[in-house]
């Protein structure tokens, strides 16, 4: 009888803790810039206390869902949030995103590729590399709509 109690207790702990023992919440939302949906942007949630980073890509309507390798969601607690342009949506001065030169540069390229124009980030740094955005992820479903300003 005690063997079954041990098995039941172990299964209960696994269910309560979830995969990997982390507390996760699902996160969805919409990203807009200057009031317009922002397609093809990457939304990243980095937990300030450590844990899994959640990443999502916006669709044509600016909507995203966070995922990570092996699952969906973001670590519960305070997260720094960054929004950046996906490579295929980035504007490159004088270079089309479907050109072989762009693909070579985006994947690391060769030394001669570095003389070509760099990808221009259209989202201000205060929303990505110097992000001011944070969000407290809670257990269950979370909706975080992100309204960006280009100026």
Image: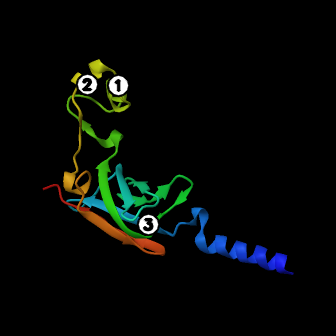
Residues under labels 2 and 3: Cα distance?
A: 37 Å
In the image, which is nearer the foreground, mark 2 or mark 3?
Answer: 2
Residue positioned 42% across, 72% down in the render: 142
Residue at the image position 34 percent from the left and 32 percent from the top: 106
**Residue at image x 34%, y 45%?**
86
- Density class for disc 3 (Cα within 10 Å; few <14, some 14-19, many ≥20) is many
Front position in the image: 24 or 142: 24
Mark 3 — residue?
A: 27
- Residue at the far right in the pictured view: 1
Pointer 2: residues within 10 angstroms few (<14), some, or many (20+)?
few
Q: Nearer the viewer, residue 88 or 5?
A: 5
As drawn, 93 above or below 39: above
- Label 1 environment density (alpha carbons within 10 Å; few <14, some 14–19, many ≥20): few
Closer to the chain start, of discs 1 and 2, is 1
Asked whether residue 134 appears in the rendered view, the answer is: yes
Q: Are marks 1 and 3 in contact (CB under 8 Å)?
A: no
For the question of whether residue 61 can be seen, the reply is no
* Circles 1, 2 touching at the beta carbon (< 8 Å): yes
The residue singled out by tag 2 in the image is 114
Residue 53, given in percent of the width and then of the height, sits at: 43, 57
Residue hosting label 1: 109
What residue lies at 48% left-to-right and 57% top-to-bottom? 67
């Amino acid at each position: 009888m005690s063997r079954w109690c041990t098995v039941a207790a172990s299964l209960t702990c696994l269910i309560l803790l979830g995969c990997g023992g982390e507390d996760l919440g699902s996160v969805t939302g919409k990203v807009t810039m200057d009031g317009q949906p922002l397609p093809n942007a990457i939304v990243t949630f980095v937990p300030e206390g450590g844990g899994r980073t959640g990443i999502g890509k916006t669709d044509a309507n600016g909507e995203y869902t966070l995922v990570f390798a092996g699952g969906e969601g973001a670590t519960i607690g305070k997260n720094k949030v960054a929004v950046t342009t996906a490579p295929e949506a980035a504007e490159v001065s004088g270079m089309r995103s479907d050109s072989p030169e762009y693909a070579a540069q985006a994947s690391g390229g060769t030394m001669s590729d570095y003389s070509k124009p760099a990808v221009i980030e259209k989202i201000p740094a205060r929303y990505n590399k110097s992000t001011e955005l944070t969000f407290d992820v809670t257990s269950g479903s979370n909706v975080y709509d992100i309204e960006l300003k280009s100026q």
